[in-house]
Every structure is written in structure tokens, then in C-alpha cells.
Image (cartoon, rainbow, N blue to C red):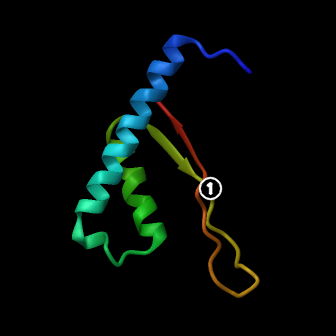
Amino acid sequence: MIPIASSDIVKMNEILKQLLSACVKLQANAIYYNATEDQRNDYIRDILDSAGYDVKDQTRRGLSPSGQMLMSILYNIQR
């Protein structure tokens, strides 16, 4: 197991609180009930960005074998 500094744990907890808060706001907003996954991801990204985080999501390129858009769930979040 890799040791984690207590200052890093504090930072991770702060990011987690911001992320959970953004998710709660998303769920409470009826505009997003029928939104696409990309639209919801963009909302979360924008909330975290306004909180001072630099959020990069994986590029949305390509198609699945069935011809549908590939979905991305990977983010790089930095402050």
C-alpha cells in the first residue's frame, strides 16, 4: 500500500465534498432529468470549474460497434 500524506487526504476529501455537492445539485435540477450523459458530465465539470478546479474529461471521440457514441467517465481534477 502506498502511504498518503495527511495533507493529500484533506485535499481528496475537499474534492469529494465538492463533487458530491455538484451531484446533489444536478439531481435537484429538473432541467437535467432527460439530459444526455454528456450534458450531465458538462454540468458537473462546470460546477467544479467554478469552485476553482481544473477539470479535463476524456475526449469524446469514436463510435461503439453498434454505432452509438462512446461514453467517457474518466476525469482529471486538479486545483
Query: Where 34 falls versus 37 (above or below)?
Result: below
Q: Is residue 28 rendered to the left or right of residue 57?
A: left
Give the secondary structure at mark 1: loop
Q: Which residue is drawn at the image coordinates 43% and 33% (left, top)?
A: 15
Q: Looking at the image, which residue is at 60% across and 68% down?
A: 71
Quarter of the figure that contains the N terminus:
top right
- Residue depicted at x 50% and y 20%: 9
Relative to 77, 53 lies left or right: left
Q: Is residue 9 above or below residue 32?
A: above
- Outermost residue toward the bottom? 66
| Rendered position, 65 above or below 59 | below
Q: Where residue 31 appears, x then y in whole percent?
A: 25, 72
User: Could you classify mark 1 by the number of other residues whose Cα lies within 10 Å: few (under 14), some (14-19), or many (20 or more)?
Assistant: few
**Point 23% across, 64% down: residue:** 29
Q: Position of residue 36 (x, y in %)?
A: 44, 75
Residue 32: x and y, percent? Answer: 31, 70
Q: Amino acid at mark 1?
A: Gln
The residue indicated by pointer 1 is 58
Q: Quadrant of residue 21?
A: top left
Judging depth in this view, the residue of 8 and 67 nearest the camera is: 8
Residue 44 at x, y percent in the picture: 39, 53
Q: Quadrant of residue 33?
A: bottom left
Which residue is at the far top?
Answer: 6
Q: Locate residue 3 relative to residue 7 in the image: left or right.
A: right
Circle count? 1
